[in-house]
Amino acid sequence: MNDALLERLRFCTVLPTLPSVAFRIIELVNDPNINLTQLAECIASDPALSAKMLKVANSPLYTTQRVATNLRQAVNMMGTHATVTVALSFSLVRSLSGHEGNTLFWRRTILAALACRLLGKHYGFNSDDLLLAGLLQDIGILALRSVAPDEYAELQAITDHEELLKAERNRFGSGHDEVGYWLLKRWGIPEHLSLACIASHADTPGHEAQATPLTCVASSGYFADVFLKGDHVMQIVAASESAARWLGMDACTTIAMLENMREKTQEFEALFDMCVLQTDQVDALLQEAKELITIANLGRQRELEEKTHRDVLTGAHNRRYFDEAFKHEFAVASRQGWPLSVAFLDIDHFKQVNDTYGHAAGDKALIALSRIIATQIRGSDIFVRYGGEEFVLLFPGTVAEEALIVLNRIRQAVASYCHTYDTATFHLTISAGLAFHMDEDMKHETAEGLLRTADNALYTAKQNGRNQIIKSKAK
Ligand SMILES: Nc1nc2c(ncn2[C@@H]2O[C@H](COP(=O)(O)OP(=O)(O)OP(=O)(O)O)[C@@H](O)[C@H]2O)c(=O)[nH]1
C-alpha cells in the first residue's frame, strides 16, 4: 500500500472499529478449541446481538423444523462456525453502519453480501463465510472516509464502483481494496476473509472462469448493482458478463440468481434493519431480461443448428441433416400412409466443367444451380447436397406425378441458365431419378431401399442420354 496513506491510517484516531464483543468473537474464530458454550456466553454479553442471533436462527434463511426459543438453542442449531460468522456479520454492520444505515454504501454492501451468500449456496461453499466476506469486501471505503473525510467527500458523486476505485487510487495512491485488507488484518480477521477485499477488485480472473469463494465475492458487487443503479438492463448485462468471466455462469442462471436475490431481499432487510431496495421496477426488468436472454439463446441455438445442418458451399442441407430427416419422413409416411417422393439429381458431365474452366468455375456453377433448385421447391420440401455434384430432393406429402412436374421445371430452369466464368459462358443440364413411397404397388420396406430405387432410376436417366427425369416403375 502507498506509504503516505499507511502513515495516515496508522495515526488516525477515528478509524472504524468493532465493538468489543466482535473482537472476542474474532479471538474465538482463531481458537481451534472453541466450543458452543463459550460462544453462547460471549454473544450473551451483548443483549442486542443475542436478540439478533435468535432472530436469525428462526428466520427462513436458516430454516430448520425446530424453533429456537433461547440463545443456547439458537447457537446449538446453527453450529459453531455459522454462529461465529453470523454474529460477526451482524455486530460489524450494527457498529459500523451507525446512523447511516440506508446510504448507498450500506445498501450495496448488504446486497453484495446477499449475492455472496446465494452464490455460495449455489456452488456448495460455506454460505455464512461468504456472507461475511461480502460484508467485508468494501470496508476500506469506511477507512478512507475516516482518514480523509473532506477529500473523500469529493468522490461521493461517483456511483460506478470501478470508477470510484480508480479515483481513490489517483487521489490516495491506494484504493479501498488494499486499505480494507490492511484494516481487516489489523482487526485479526482470518486471511481467507480479508482476501475478499482484494478479490473483489482483481482485474482478471487470471485463469479460466472457475467458481471459488473469492470469485463469488468478485462478481457479487455486479449483482448488487442490478438493484441499485438506474440503468438496470445494462447492469443485468454487466452482472451476466462478470458471472461468466469469474464463475463460468451462463446468462439464464445469472437471471435465476438475481430473481432469488430479489425474493430474499426482504428477509435480509428485516435482519439487518435496513431498507435496501427502493424500486419495484426490478421485477419487471428481471422479467424483461429473462425474455431477452431466452430469445437470444434460442436464436443462437437455432443459428448453430442451422450451421451444422447446412452445406457450406451451396447452403443446401447437408448429409447429416438428410440422414435424420429422411428417416423421420419415411417413418411418418409409412405410419400415416402419406405419400413421399424422393429424387436423386446429378449434374451431367460436370467433370468437363472442372476440366475446362477450373475447379472455381465448377464451385460457382454448383452455387448457381443450388439457387435455381431452391427457388423451384416449396418450403416443406427438403433439398440436400448428397455429395459432390449429387443432390437429393425429398417431397413429403407429394405423389410422384406432382414431384415429376416440379423436377421437370427444375430441369428446364437449369438447362436454360447461362453460367459465366471470366469471359467464358456455358450451360449445364441435370438428370434425376424419382422414387415414390406408399402406394400399394410402390411400398418400400426401408428408407435405404427407397433411396436405392431413386438412384437406380437416375442411372437409367444417365444411360438414356441425360438431361431427363426417370420415374421408377412400380414393382
Ligand atoms: N468444382 C467442384 N467440383 C466437384 C465438387 N464435388 C465434385 N465435383 C466434381 O464433379 C465431377 C463429377 O464427375 P463424374 O462423377 O465423372 O460425373 P460427370 O462428369 O458429372 O458425368 P455424369 O454424372 O456421368 O454425367 C468430378 O470432376 C468432381 O471432381 C465440388 O464441390 N466442386
Image (cartoon, grey):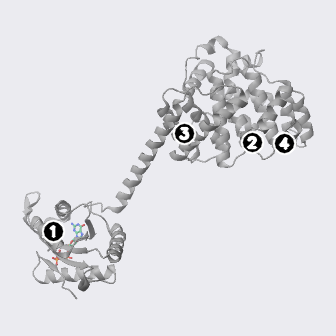
Find out if the beta carbon at label 3 lies less than 8 Å from the nearest ligand 1 atom: no
Disc 1 is placed on an element classified as helix
Q: CA distance from mark 1 to mark 4?
A: 79 Å
Name the amino acid, label 1.
Val
The count of marks equals 4
Q: Nearer the viewer, mark 4 or mark 2?
A: 2
Q: Nearer the viewer, mark 3 or mark 2?
A: 2
Q: Percent x, y for residue 352?
A: 14, 72
Residue at mark 3 to residue at mark 2: CA–CA distance = 28 Å
Most foreground residue, 113 or 157: 113
Amino acid at pointer 3: Ser
**Pointer 3 with pointer 1, Cβ within 8 A:** no
Question: x, y percentage for residue 165?
Answer: 59, 25
Residue bearing mark 2: 62
Q: Which residue is mark 3?
A: 242
What's the residue type where badge 4 is placed?
A: Thr
| Badge 1: residue crowd in 10 Å (few <14, some 14–19, many ≥20) | some
Pointer 4: residues within 10 angstroms few (<14), some, or many (20+)? some
Q: Nearer the viewer, residue 32 or 277?
A: 277
Label 3 or label 1, whichever lies nearer to me, is 1
Q: Residue 28 vs residue 140: left or right? A: right
Q: Which residue is mark 4?
A: 80
Residue 109, picture quadrant: top right
Q: Residue drawn 55% across and 23% down? A: 159
The amino acid on which the numbered mark 2 sits, given as a three-letter code, is Tyr
Name the residue: 74% across, 40% down: 128
Numbered circle sitting on residue 406: 1
164 sits left or right of 462 in the view: right
Earlier in the chain: of badge 4 and badge 2, it is 2
